[in-house]
Image (spheres, rainbow, N blue to C red):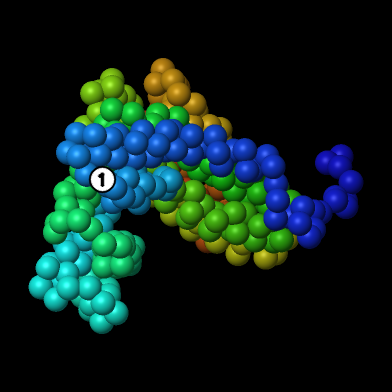
Amino acid sequence: MSGPATQPIATGWRARVNPRRAALRVRDSGNAIVQIVVAATAAYSVAHYGLGHATPLLAATVTVSSLGLARDARPRQIAENVGGLLLGILVAETLILVAGTGWWQIAVALGVSLVIGRFLSPQPGFAIAAGLQALIVTIIPAPAPFLRLIDGIIGGITALIVTALIPHNPIRTELRSARAVFAGFEGTTAAIVQALHRGDRFRAERGLEKARALTAPIEGWRESVESGIAIARISPFLRRQRFELQRHDRIRRSMDLAIRNLRVTARRVVYLCDDGTPRPIAADLVSEVARSAGLVAASLDDISFEPAAQDALRAVASRLDPRAILPAGSLGEHNFISGLRPLVVDLLTATGVPPAEARKAVPRI
């Protein structure tokens, strides 16, 4: 028995304040916090002690704004953030040099920065960053023209250097995202198996909901692994992890396709379960696919699981002939078995099998 039918549900402030989740947020952002602190301090020190700038505010703020705490810490993304910040500083410094300071200069600098930033980048944050820096420059006086632009450049360069020299662990980060994807895949297939065993439309609809909910996890995995690959390209400390990150990205791309086909499979199960008839053979096939996907998940940590995953998936693929496995089956059942074929092919490519070879693993129909 699974447990009581009713469970306590947190309400009020307890639903909003969760110490465990808060601690996990801090843990996950620990490396980013270290990067920001080191970069801001270093940029300030270079501008203040190295170049003699009295108050190099922008040297520090540019590093904080460009690095941030977001998951996507790709050097290209950081460089784009720096570009937006420097754009606002440049526009404001130029306007101050030409027209001085005042209320209308603030309005012009802000407006021009937003317009140019929106023109140059489709990302709204780019224009907002330019506008904020323009406000800082026009409101706070400076002893010399374009001094703050130099501070901003120092901050941007420092942010990129710190990204390379104090990188976060990209594999640990993207593995966390990958496990969320495979956990969702497992939950979806479990619901589908139960629905087929019982002929339960409600359970089938639950499986379809779970399949649709995998969009966010797979997108999060994509961001994590692409960010890790980009950082590994510039960091001398992550060269050994490049192969693993590229292998995980190959698995991620195949799993993206597999999840799309899983949604199709889940929709077909909903229709199959309309009549309330149990379909144990179809349920067993999905169970085998789920077990094979578990081996693919295990191969993320240990590449030696890939051959076992390939063998398991080839064994499933060889049986996916609708007429052979269900000679007296309905058209809907045959369509369901046929729908499993591209799903298994995608899982096979996730193990490193070339797509053409993976397609040959399923029998011709």
Kindly give the residue lying farthest to the left in the view shown. Answer: 98
- Is 240 in front, or is 310? 240
Q: Quadrant of the N terminus?
A: top right
203 displayed left or right of 223:
right
Depth check: give the residue in front, 169 or 196.
169
Q: Relative to 300, is 26 above or below?
A: below
Q: Is residue 47 left or right of residue 8?
A: left
The image shows residue 138 at horizontal and vertical percentages of 26, 67
Residue that appears at 48% across and 39% down? 29
Which residue ends up furthest to the bottom in the rendered image? 104
Q: Could you say where residue 6 lies in the image, as x and y percent from the top left?
A: 88, 52
Which x, y percent locates residue 348?
A: 38, 35
Crowd around label 1: few <14 · some 14–19 · many ≥20 (10 Å): few
Decide: is 311 above or below 177. above
Residue at image coords 77%, 52%: 14
Label 1's element?
A: loop
Image x and y of residue 27, in percent: 54, 34
Q: Which residue is mark 1?
A: 54
